[in-house]
Amino acid sequence: MNQNKSNDKPASSADSIEKIVSLCKRRGFVFQSSEIYGGLQGFYDFGQLGVEMKNNLKQLWWRWMTKSHENIVGIDGAIITNPKVWEASGHLKSFVDPLVECKKCHHRFKADDLENKNQCPDCGGQLTEPKQFNILVPTELGVIEGEKTRSYLRGEACQTIYLDYKNVLDTARLKIPFGICQIGKAFRNEVTPGNFLYRQREFEQWDLQWFCHPNEMEKWFEYWKQERMSWFKSIFTYPENLGFYQHEKLAHYAKKAFDIEYKPSPVGKEMEGIHWRGDWDLSGHSKFSGQDLSYTDSETGEKFVPNIVETSGGVDRTFLFLMLDAYTEETDRVVLKLNPKIAPYKVAVFPLLRNKPELVSLAKEIYRGLKKDFSVVFDDRGNIGKRYYAQDEIGTPYCVTVDFESLEDKKVTVRDRDTMKQERINISQLPNWLKEKLEM
Ligand code: ATP
C-alpha cells in the first residue's frame, strides 16, 4: 500500500479536531475518562481500537530503538520515585507555569500563551498578576495521618533513566556511546489542559537518553535529530507535513533544542523534542545522591561525566497527529488512511450474505485461519457497502469478501482501502499475499 502519496490532503481545518474526537468516541478509539461521572479534564481512556493502534505504535518505536540500533537497551521504571529526585532535577523549583485569572469572568490562562498579558481574551476584563504554579502532581505515601510522606508522580519519564543509568551500565556491559530507552506515563498539573490528547494531565512519553563523550555531542545531536525525523516520516501518511522548529530560548545547559512538529495541526504542533542535556542530569543526581555517576573509559582510562542527547516524544500526541494526518473525507466515504502497520485491524473478513450458511462458514474458516497471524475482524452485519464504509473509517487496509464463486473457485475478493480496487486471490495464498502487502 502506497504510504508516501503526494500531498493532496488539505491542511487541517479548525473543526478537524472535533471530527477526530467524534470519530474516536464513535468507533472506540478514545473515550473521556470517567465519563459517566462527567469526566475529568485532561484524562482519557483508550478504547478497544485505540489500544490496538497505540500498542502498534509503541511496538514500532520499541523495535526501531532496540533492534534497529546497536547499543540501546530499554527499561520500565516506577512512576513514583524518592522525592529527592525532583529536587535534584530542578522540577520542584522550576517546573512552574505562570497563571493569570480574569477579574471579571474568572477564566484562567497560562500567561505564556497570551499576547496581551493585561486583558482577558474571552471578555476583555482585567487580568490578575501572574502567580507561579508548580505542575508536578503530588501524592502521599503511608497510611497513618501525620506520618505520610509527600512524593510526586513523575513529571517526565526520563528521570528514571538517569536513576538507572549506573545499574544498566554495571549489568549490561555497555560502552559509551550507548542509549537507554523507555516508554512510560508522565503526569503534569497542566494549567490549561485541553485540545483533546494534545495537553493532558496524564500522558505517555517515549524517551531515548543517549550517553556519549562530551566531545561527540555535536555529532550525536545531529545524528538523533535526523534519525527521529526519518522514523516519524516513515509512519505518517503525508511525511511532508512534518518539520523542525528550532528553540531560541534555551536551558542554561543546552546548546540547542529542536522540536519535531506536525505543521498543519490546528492545536499545538510539538510532537517530540530533541534536547542537548549535556552533563546536567548526571551531575545533578551525583551531587544530590552523593553517588559517583561518572564513567571511566576502559581503554584510555579517561574519567568523565557522560553527556546526554535526549529524544523525548509524546505517544498520545503522535497518536492524535497520525489520526489528523490520515483522516480523509471523500465524496461518499470517510477514510482513515493510516499506515497499515499502525491500523488497529489489518484485515476484515465478510460473507457476502449473512443468511447463507455456506458463505458464513467459509468466511469464518478464513477469519480463524488469518487470526493466527493478523489482527483481523469478522463482520456480517448490514450490506457489503456499509461494511466497507465501517472499515474505511477505522483504517482497515484490506477487506476480504467470500461470495458464491468462492465456493467453486476457492478465491476471495480483496479490496484495497485507499484505491478501492478489488482483486481475486486464492484462499490458500491469502496469508502470504497479505504478509507481502503489509510488509510483515
Ligand atoms: P509543551 O511545551 O507543549 O508543554 P514540553 O516542551 O514541556 O511540551 P517535554 O517536557 O519536552 O514537553 O515533553 C516531551 C514530549 O511529551 C512533548 O514533546 C509532548 O509530545 C509530550 N507532552 C508533554 N506534555 C504533554 C501533555 N500535557 N499532554 C500530552 N503530551 C505531552
Image (cartoon, rainbow, N blue to C red):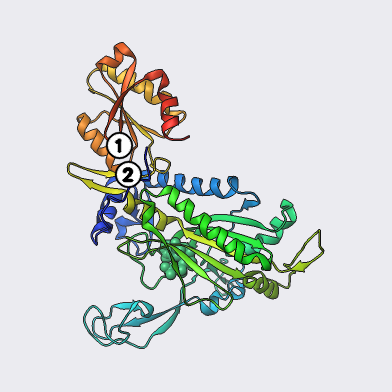
Q: For this view, does 150 lie left or right of residue 407? A: right
Does label 1 point to a residue whose CB lies under 8 Å from ligand 1? no
Ligand 1 shown in quarter: bottom left
Asked whether residue 42 appears in the rendered view, the answer is yes
Question: From the viewer's perspective, is 196 left or right of 177?
Answer: left
Q: Which quarter shows the N terminus? A: top left
Residue closest to the far left:
331
Q: Which of 334 and 274 is in front in this view?
A: 274
Give the alpha-carbon distance from disc 1 to disc 2, as whole Å. 8 Å
Q: In which quarter of the image is residue 79?
A: bottom right
Q: Residue furthest front?
A: 6
As drawn, is 189 to the left or to the right of 355? right
Residue at mark 2? 337
Which label's residue is closer to the chain start, 1 or 2?
2
Say if mark 1 contacts mark 2, CB within 8 Å: yes
**Closer to the camera, 204 or 177?**
177
> Residue 395: percent from the left, percent from the top?
32, 41
Q: Which amino acid does label 2 sit on?
A: Lys
Residue type beneath disc 1:
Arg
**Could you say which is closer to the camera, residue 350 or residue 85?**
350
Q: Residue at x 25, y 79 (%)?
A: 121
Could you say where residue 290 lies in the image, as x and y percent from the top left? Answer: 73, 73
Task: Say few, some or many: other residues with alpha carbon within 10 Å of mark 2 (under 14 / 14 to 19 / 20 or more).
Answer: many
Q: Name the residue under label 1.
A: 417
